[in-house]
Image: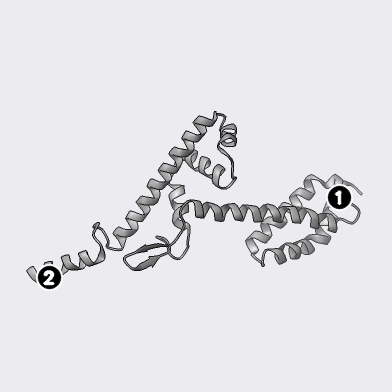
Amino acid sequence: MSTDDAFDAAYREHYWAVSRFVARRLDDQAWDVEEVVAEVFAVAWRRRAELPGSPLPWLYGVARHCLANTVRGKGRYRRLLLRLGHHEVTRGGRTVASPDAERPGSWVLEALSRLAEADQEVLRLTAWEELTVEELGTVLGCGRSAAAMRLHRARRRLREQIETLRRDERISLGCTSGKGDRAQSADRADKDGQA
C-alpha cells in the first residue's frame, strides 16, 4: 500500500474518532474542533510516510499536540485582551463592559484594526506570540533599540485609538462634557429654569 493510500485509509477510518477526541477536549466548540482536526490531518498528510500500521494512537498523539497549540493560542488571546486593557470601566455609577457590550473585547480588536499593519504586527508578536524585545528585533530584522522604539510607538498609537473609541462611546451616550453626572444635571436644571 502506498503512503497516499495509507493516509486515505487512516482518514476514512479515523476521522470521526479524532473529531470526537478533539471535541471532548474543546467542549464541542464546533469551529475550534474543525480547525484542530484539519490541522491533525494536515500533519498526518505531511508525515504520511511515518504513519504506523495502526494509526489511531499516533493520530491521537498528533491531536494532543495540536490541541496544546490551540490552548496556548487561546491563552495568548486572553492575555492580550488583559494587556490591552479589556476590563470593565465604571462611568457615572453605571458599569459598561465595552463600547460594544454584546461582544466583550471587540473594542480592543477594533482599536487594533485601526492601526497600521506594521503596528498591528509588532503588538501581535509581543502579545500573542509573547516575543521579547530581542526576539522582536530578530523577527523585524532590526536591533533591540529599534524594536523597543517600534513597540513603544505601537503601544502609544493603540492607547490613542482606545481613547478615541472611549471618547466616541461617551459622545454616543450623551456624556460629551468633562463634567460629572451631578454637574450635568445642575446645568440642565439651570437651563430649564431660564427657559
Q: Position of residue 104 (x, y in %)?
A: 47, 62
Q: Position of residue 50 (x, y in %)?
A: 86, 46
In x, y percent, where is residue 16?
A: 77, 64
Q: Is residue 20 above or below residue 126?
A: below
Question: Label 2 crowding class (10 Å Cα cut-off): few <14, some 14-19, many 20+?
Answer: few
Residue type marked 1: Leu
The residue where tag 2 is placed is 192
Tell how many labels.
Answer: 2
Q: Could you tell me which residue is drawn at 67 percent across and 63 percent down?
A: 26
Q: Which element is circle 2 on? A: helix
- Of labels 2 and 1, the one closer to you: 2
Residue 15 occupies which quadrant of the picture? bottom right
User: Few, some or many C-alpha atoms within 10 Å of disc 1 (few <14, some 14-19, many ≥20)?
Assistant: some
- Left or right side of 181 for 29: right
Residue 41 shows up from this direction: yes
Could you say whether the residue bearing mark 1 is in a helix, strand or loop?
loop
Q: Is residue 161 left or right of residue 39?
A: left
Farthest-out residue, left: 194
Q: Name the N-terminal-most of marks 2 and 1.
A: 1
Q: Residue at x 51, y 54 (%)?
A: 81
